[in-house]
Amino acid sequence: MANKYYRHQTVKSAQDASVFADEYTWAILDLLRAAGPAGLSAENIHKQMEAEMGRVSKSKVYGILKRMYQNDWIHRTYNEVDEARRNSIKMDWAGIMLEEEYDCFVVEKEKRFINERLFPVFLEYIKKTIEDMSKDKTAKKWLPEKNYCKPCRKSHEASEFFSSLLDIATAEFMSSNTYQSLTKELSFVEPIRD
């Protein structure tokens, strides 16, 4: 599994889709995810893929890595010990693509409310979830590791974890009676006629 929390990746273009349509892309992402911020050289990726999948074209692996780098999905940093460039995941899987004008409008109009009312609730929810998960042996595996991406100086896994928690809360809200009541109150559901 290429990501610990998400089963999909937001695709922004037909080009993105063509890269993700290739099974080797997913194998490479799995290997890079497992390697963490230290990453892997293209040669090591190729060797591991052949060990897991049988014969794999070296040029295919290098080509996919090149496209991933061009799309700004991976970092390439030189490792003096290996005397080779290592690839590591750069992209955060979290998030969605909203229509830009709509997004800007909502943020402009609601920024103060979001900052003052929602952010404190988000913080409380995230901290409580981390606390609860850290006390549960089974759930600990879902907590992000404290591995930092050297070029970004942050943990991509932590960003994805936080976003996934907020996505879960949103999904729970959307399937709740509270949401159903809201849609009725605002007349976004057709009234039931006898």
Image (cartoon, rainbow, N blue to C red):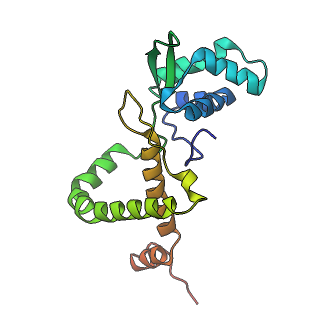
On the image, the x and y values in percent for residue 108 come to 22, 52
Relative side of 159 to 28, left or right: left
Q: Nearer the viewer, residue 14 or 50?
A: 50
Q: Nearer the viewer, residue 136 or 165?
A: 136
Residue at position x 42%, y 45% in the image? 159
Residue at position x 48%, y 36% in the image? 12
Give the answer, above or below, for where 152 lies relative to 110.
Answer: above
Q: Nearer the viewer, residue 82 or 117?
A: 82
Q: Is residue 95 visible?
A: no
Give the answer, above or below, for where 175 lies relative to 162.
Answer: below
Quadrant (top left, top right, bottom left, bottom right) of the N terminus: top right
Instruction: Point out the residue furthest to the bottom here.
Output: 194
On the image, the x and y values in percent for residue 63 come to 59, 16
Give the answer, above or below, for where 185 lies relative to 12.
Answer: below
Relative side of 49 to 106, left or right: right
Instruction: Point out the residue furthest to the right here.
Output: 54
Residue at position x 44%, y 62% in the image? 131
Q: Is residue 22 visible?
A: yes
On the image, the x and y values in percent for residue 76 come to 46, 19
Relative side of 68 to 98, left or right: right
Q: Nearer the viewer, residue 102 or 78?
A: 78
Give the answer, above or below, for where 69 lies relative to 21.
Answer: above
On the image, the x and y values in percent for residue 87 come to 51, 22
Classify residue 118 by image quadrant.
bottom left
Q: Disc count in the image?
A: 0
Classify residue 60 by image quadrant.
top right
Instruction: Point out the residue furthest to the left here.
Output: 112
Classify residue 117 by image quadrant.
bottom left
